[in-house]
Image (spheres, rainbow, N blue to C red):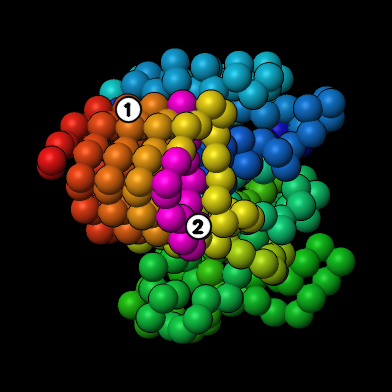
Amino acid sequence: MKILILAGGFATRLWPLTEKRAKPLLLLDGKTILAHILDKIPKEDGNLETILLTNKKFAGDFENELAKLGRRDVKIFCEDAHSDNEKVGALGAVSLAINEFKINDNILILAGDNLLPDLKIEQLFCENDSAKLAVREVKDFYEARKFGVVEVGPDSEYGFEVVDFEEKPEEPKSKLVSTGFCAIGKDLFPFLHEFAQKNPDALGAIFADLLNNGKSVFAEKVTGHWFDVGSFETYLEAHKMLQGEDLKLGKKVVQDGNKFSGKVSIGDGCEVKNCRILNSIVYPGCKLENCRISETIIDENCDFTGVDLNRKLVRKRTRLYNF
């Protein structure tokens, strides 16, 4: 089994936070989303070779993060893209990586901006001639319209058999949706390559194509939380739900006279004095004094005095002083 982590997006909905940072490198509970994902992949398991699919703009940042994590077992496949309109697409990148690395094993595809804390990698192992999806039930049919909607039949030794898959339908037939974590057997690669030629960005739609070609697709129902970090709102919600302790302090943090409430994360090397902070993430290197911060994400090396912020995304190195 080869594991492919999709990390080639440019995440424009989270700018300025992701203007110069890949979304899998956002912090949650004191470490990057990528680190959370890699925690599920044992270093010592030689049967689970991992390849991270990214672009030229962020390749160096991922190399640094992997070195920091000690994950020299993870290879990087870099597509020739510096912006959104140069991307080859998620499915196109998977197809290229299969050819580039001459992969002849089943592949497990993980979305680099999603977290399924309770998922075990082995839950998605599939047979050579089939595919498998990690699926969750959402709260209502309106919510299901945002995702690939799955209808399943009876349970079997391989999981629930998928009888229909529809990408972002206007009228969903089910509240069961694909999470972006999936597996595709090596015997199905010819269908994947052919479909990717015409639909390079339609990763979810490949499963409808496989069903139309009479191939077996199964679903693994995953319980627990699912964090799809696609916007400010979902990022903040993931922070509040995933962080275990109320206050997460990084290394060499100086703080005095503060009141923290909800879930607060303060990054390495920050100085925070006489502040009131609620449900917020403060990235490393920031200096905050006499501030009121509520449900806000503050990027690296910001310097604030006497500032009130509510539900903001703050660009790195911003300086504001209100004496």
Asked whether 52 falls inside the magenta stretch, the response is: no
The dot on residue 263 is: 2
Q: Earlier in the sequence, mark 1 or mark 2?
A: 2
In the rendered image, the residue lying farthest to the left is 322
Residue 44 image point, x, y percent: 84, 26
Residue 266 covered by magenta stretch: yes
Q: CA distance from mark 1 to mark 2?
A: 21 Å
Q: Amino acid at mark 2?
A: Lys
The disc label shown at residue 155, or none:
none
Tag 1: amino acid: Asn
Q: Is residue 38 above or below residue 306?
A: above
Residue 287 sits above or below residue 144 on the image: above
Residue 27 as seen in the image, left or right of residue 299: right
Picture quadrant where residue 170 is located? bottom left
Q: Residue at x 45, y 41 (%)?
A: 256
Q: Residue at x 71, y 56 (%)?
A: 119
Taking the spot 55% from the left edge, 62% from the top edge, the residue there is 241
**Residue 226 placement: quadrant:** bottom right
Label count reads 2
In contact (CB < 8 Å): disc 1 and disc 2: no
| Residue extent of the magenta highlight | 256-269
Q: Main secondary structure of the magenta part?
A: strand
What element does badge 2 sit on? Answer: strand
Residue 289, x across and y down, in percent: 30, 40
Residue at 43 percent across and 55 percent down: it is 259
Whether residue 15 is visible: no
Q: Residues within 10 Å of mark 2 (few under 14, many from 20)?
A: many
Name the one closer to the observer, 18 or 195. 18
Q: Is residue 100 above or below residue 41?
A: above
Q: Nearer the viewer, residue 244 or 131?
A: 244
Residue at mark 1: 301
